[in-house]
Image (spheres, helix red, strand yellow):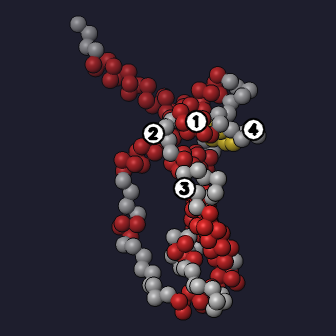
Amino acid sequence: MTDEKEFVDYYEVLQVGQNCDSKLLDSAYRFLAKMYHPDHSQTANTAKFTQLNEAYNILRDPEKRADYDKSYLGNTTKTFSPPPLEKEFEVDQRIAAEDADMHDRILLCLYKRRREHAYDAGIVGWTLREMLDCSDDNFEFHVWYLKSKGFIAITEQGTLAVTIQGVDHVISLCRTSLPAKLLITQSSNPQN
């Protein structure tokens, strides 16, 4: 770092701790770069986007990061203390249940599309997101999860489509939920 240039806390720019690993660094960069990208109509910020790129280019390179860390120690008085573990890993069970419901809804939509249009089984991601009234970030989370589980795939056309594992999952969901629905219907309609 040159003396002429004012010191910039790149860890703060990327909203990560000094001891973050490369995966966290990459994730933080992708998230923030997407948010501040000049093409993003609602949150575009060219200055922040440029600063993000500068910070990421320094911190992702081990040699540049080591040099930067020497300067960092001399220019900051911050100490990093991790948040208490119970708060860091606390998950609202309601949100997890809503996520599971959204996964099922996405799979059911893609299953229906595959059943009705076997040779054009994919749905454009933003169309599916709009149909399900889901935010961009939440939708990206759900797509990541379902792709990682092998339940959905991206087609050659760039659309989302259910896989064989996804079809099997939908069928198993229906097999377990249908008897429960029948029991509820039967108990609410007693025969005379």
Q: Is residue 80 above or below residue 129?
A: below
**Amino acid type, mark 2:** Asp
Residue under circle 1?
128
Residue under circle 4?
157
Of the residues tagged 1 and 2, which is closer to the observer?
A: 1
Residue under circle 3?
43
The alpha-carbon separation of the residues under discs 2 and 4 comes to 27 Å
Image spot of residue 181 (x, y percent): 38, 24
Give the number of the disc on residue 101: 2
Of the residues tagged 2 and 4, which is closer to the observer?
A: 4
- Residue at 38%, 27% in the rendered image: 180
Of callouts 3 and 2, which one flags the residue occurring earlier in the amino acid sequence?
Answer: 3
The alpha-carbon separation of the residues under discs 1 and 3 comes to 23 Å
**Amino acid type, mark 1:** Leu
Q: Secondary structure at mark 3?
A: loop
> Is residue 163 visible to the viewer in this orientation of the structure?
no
